[in-house]
Amino acid sequence: MNTFQPIEILRAVPKIFQAFPTTMLILLASLAFSMLIGAVFAMMSLSRNKVLNAVSKGYVSFMRGIPTLILIFLIYLGMPQLLKQVGIDMTGISLTAYIIACLSLSASANMSEMMRSAYLAVDKGQREAALSVGMSPAAAFARIILPQAVGVAIPALGNNMIMLFKETSLAFTIGVLDMLGKARAVSAANYGATKLEIYIAAGIIFWALCFLMEKGTKLAEKAYTKGRKI
């Protein structure tokens, strides 16, 4: 039985950190796409059109209810088979693209709810007042509603980003060499002799980065809301 060697934790950190660029690529791309998708469904949920409203609610309910890991397997394993039957070949798509698509879809539901809630948190009277003084609906949204909604949304955005960052660790399930995938590779290279130490190192890295994101979110919220009435 192998004895616990704390020094191996320190040795594993730089090895695992080699995959940091891949993890950040997945995080930032997924964050951007999930916000775009979320914005579309947020607008649909705020629409007076009952069909659009129902579609948005159904999408959000489904994406919040299905585990991200199952979604990854459905898209990575199922979609290529389905599209192949109609003559579309997906063999050239990278594994990283698959995981970004999956995480974007999964996170978009929370992004949609975040945007919808932030919009509704702004007093409707302010929009009405802006329209009454001659502003167009677009100008009222851009100059009055959006700045306040952003301030309301920053804490939730920070939480969503941290959750999304932790879910990047699922990338290894389809062979992407993210930080957790790198940890597994390092462990396999020494035949699991320091498996515990390596996963402790991976956990410390994830915790430290989540801590920095949390602090960064608080600083961003403080800086943005300073001098503003949110």
Image (cartoon, rainbow, N blue to C red):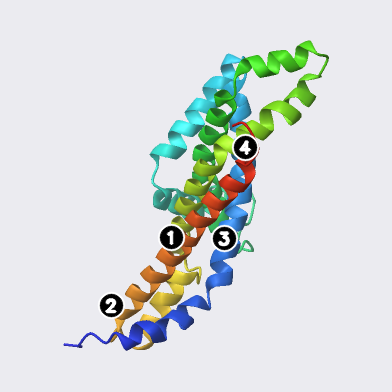
Q: Secondary structure at mark 1?
A: helix
Whether the residues at callouts 4 and 2 have beta carbons within 8 Å, the answer is no
Q: Earlier in the sequence, mark 2 or mark 1?
A: 1
- Vertical arrangement, residue 183 with respect to residue 142, above or below: below
- Label 1 – label 3 distance at C-alpha: 11 Å
- The quadrant in which the C terminus is found is top right
Q: Residue type at mark 2?
A: Leu
Q: Earlier in the sequence, mark 1 or mark 3?
A: 3
The numbered disc on residue 170 is 1
Q: Mark 3 highlights which residue? A: 26
**Which residue is drawn at the image coordinates 27% and 87% (left, top)?**
5
Q: Earlier in the sequence, mark 4 or mark 1?
A: 4
Q: Mark 2 highlights which residue? A: 196
Question: Where does the image place residue 22, in percent across and percent down from the top left?
Answer: 57, 69
Q: Secondary structure at mark 3?
A: helix
The label nearer to you, 4 versus 1, is: 4
The label nearer to you, 4 versus 3, is: 4
The local crowd at label 2, few if under 14, some if 14 to 19, many if 20 or more residues have their Cα within 10 Å, is some
The local crowd at label 1, few if under 14, some if 14 to 19, many if 20 or more residues have their Cα within 10 Å, is some
Whether the residues at callouts 4 and 1 have beta carbons within 8 Å, the answer is no
Q: Nearer the viewer, residue 19 or 65?
A: 19
Q: Secondary structure at mark 4?
A: helix
Q: Nearer the viewer, residue 22 or 220?
A: 220
Picture quarter containing residue 229?
top right
Answer with left or right where residue 58 lies relative to residue 35.
left
- Label 2 – label 3 distance at C-alpha: 26 Å
- Vertical arrangement, residue 40 with respect to residue 213, above or below: above
The numbered disc on residue 150 is 4
Q: Residue type at mark 4?
A: Val
